Image (cartoon, grey):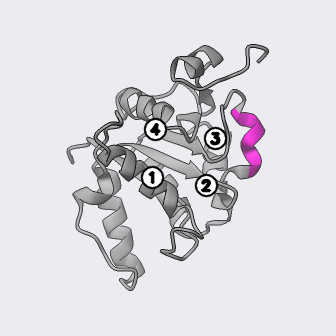
Amino acid sequence: MAYRNGTYIAFHAGGTTDPTSSDIKYYRMLKAWHEHDDIEFQFINSHEKVSGVRDSSKKTTLQRSLMERLNNSKNMVLIIGPTTRFDTDWVPFEIGYAVDRCKIPIIATYIGYEWILAPIQLTSLWPPAFANRIGNSTVRAIHIPFKQRAIDEAIRQFNHDSMPTTPLSYYTAATHRSLGINVPETL
């Protein structure tokens, strides 16, 4: 069995490495937070634990590399934006392998949201592979906004030995506030 201490990050690249036209910019933001001396944000990046492959590599080579990275992961951060649901290639594969084979929790982070208190209202953003596993309760997921402190807390809190309790887990308004996220008192 692999040593599972990494965090795997999945995002919709849209077939490009251009950071301005895909969600790769959010992956790079996570890396920047991690590398910044004045920001408390620590994780072991599963993508850096395994040798990289080129975009021109065969699909089976890429799949093997992704599976190795996932096998070494304790959790997955799934960056969900407006186009994530349209990914029909790697994101569905990554979700399926993470949940069905590796049995790791998903930390679903939503771009453009200040807080998440009712994840069921975000179904229109979910990739089908994620929605199906929520529907049949095979995934354990925490749904949070794409905010540094919330992601850091979830990475520290959830792993293959400490799962969210349901497919639709979320932090309470009080927890959001404790993480510096301003949730109105009326919610």
Numbered badge on residue 29: 1
Whether residue 80 sits left or right of residue 97 in the image: it is right
Write the residue at 50% across / 27% down: 164
Element under label 4? Answer: loop
Magenta highlight on residue 138: no
Mark-to-mark CA distance, 2 and 1: 25 Å
Write the residue at 31% across / 67% down: 65
Name which of mark 4 and mark 2 comes first in the sequence.
4
* Quadrant location, the C terminus: top right
Numbered badge on residue 79: none
Numbered badge on residue 105: 4
Instruction: Name the one closer to the observer, 6 or 162.
Output: 6
CB atoms of marks 1 and 3 within 8 Å: no
Q: Dot 2 corresponds to which residue?
A: 129
Mark-to-mark CA distance, 3 and 4: 12 Å
Mark 4: amino acid: Pro
Mark-to-mark CA distance, 1 and 4: 21 Å
Mark 2 or mark 1, which is nearer to you?
1
Name which of mark 3 and mark 4 comes first in the sequence.
4
Mark 1 or mark 3, which is nearer to you?
1
Q: Estimate the x, y position of residue 10 in percent, counting from the top left.
A: 48, 55
* Image: magenta residue range: 119-124
Q: Is residue 65 above or below residue 35?
A: below
Q: Estimate the x, y position of residue 154 in percent, counting from the top left.
A: 45, 31
* Most common SS among magenta residues: helix
Q: Dot 3 corresponds to which residue?
A: 134
Element under label 1? Answer: helix
Whether residue 163 sits left or right of residue 168 in the image: it is left
Regarding residue 136, the answer to whether it shows in the image is yes
Name which of mark 2 and mark 1 comes first in the sequence.
1
